[in-house]
Amino acid sequence: LSLAKPTEQEALKQSRLQAEEEGEELTMILEALDDDGDGLMSMSEFASAMTNDRIVHLLHRVGVDIKDAELFFTTVASLGNRQDAIEIPEFVAQVMRLRGQALSIDLHAVLLQLHALQDTLARKFDELRKEQMSIRSSLIANATPVGKGVLAIDTTEMIIRDRF
């Protein structure tokens, strides 16, 4: 009975071989989907391919279950620091890293959204800081000195002037 059971090393080797075969199969699938033959997988090529049930089935068979093609592509491409298109071998490597791990891909999607949110917040913060500096400059320019280091500011007049 113990002779029929593969050792941990044999099981690991078998798992690696299977992953390698699946990676090769996925590469062949993606190369067939490469409409313009440039060796890159674009968002539009991938999204178009995901409307074909046969291709969805083949991807599912190698452990890739995609619910949202655009989000999946964006996530995989961002892992390779790409946006519009990604080289097929690199795309396959990223997909193989994520395959069969629904929680992992969901986590990567959340991380991608978090990075986008951070970028947006940073831009908004910079805009607010510039607006604050502009208001401060305007207040100082319109202030009346009333003593050493003391300025009187008539904000009512400034607000009315800025609105009209």
Image (cartoon, rainbow, N blue to C red):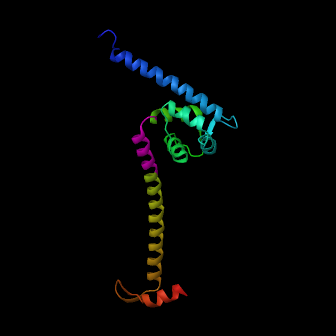
Decide whether residue 34 is among the magenta residues: no
As drawn, the residue found furthest toward the top would be: 3
As drawn, the residue found furthest toward the right would be: 36
Which residue is drawn at the image coordinates 60% and 31% (left, top)? 29
Left or right side of 1 for 71: right
Left or right side of 1 for 162: right
Observer-nearest residue: 61 or 164?
Answer: 61
- Report the number of discs: 0
Coordinates of residue 147 in the picture (x, y in percent): 35, 89
Res. 34 visible in picture: yes
User: Which quarter of the figure has residue 121?
Assistant: bottom left
Where are the magenta residues, as a range?
Answer: 99-112
Work out whether 132 lies above or below 155. above
Left or right side of 74 for 33: right
Coordinates of residue 12 in the picture (x, y in percent): 38, 20
Work out whether 101 lies above or below 116. above
Work out whether 119 lies above or below 147. above
Observer-nearest residue: 103 or 136?
Answer: 103
Work out whether 3 lies above or below 145. above
In the picture, the quarter occupied by the N terminus is top left
Decide whether residue 110 is among the magenta residues: yes
As drawn, the residue found furthest toward the left would be: 2
In the picture, the quarter occupied by the C terminus is bottom right
Observer-nearest residue: 103 or 163?
Answer: 103
Which residue is drawn at the image coordinates 55% and 32% (left, top)? 58
Coordinates of residue 114 in the picture (x, y in percent): 43, 53
Res. 90 visible in picture: no
Q: Main secondary structure of the magenta part?
A: helix
Coordinates of residue 21 in the picture (x, y in percent): 52, 22
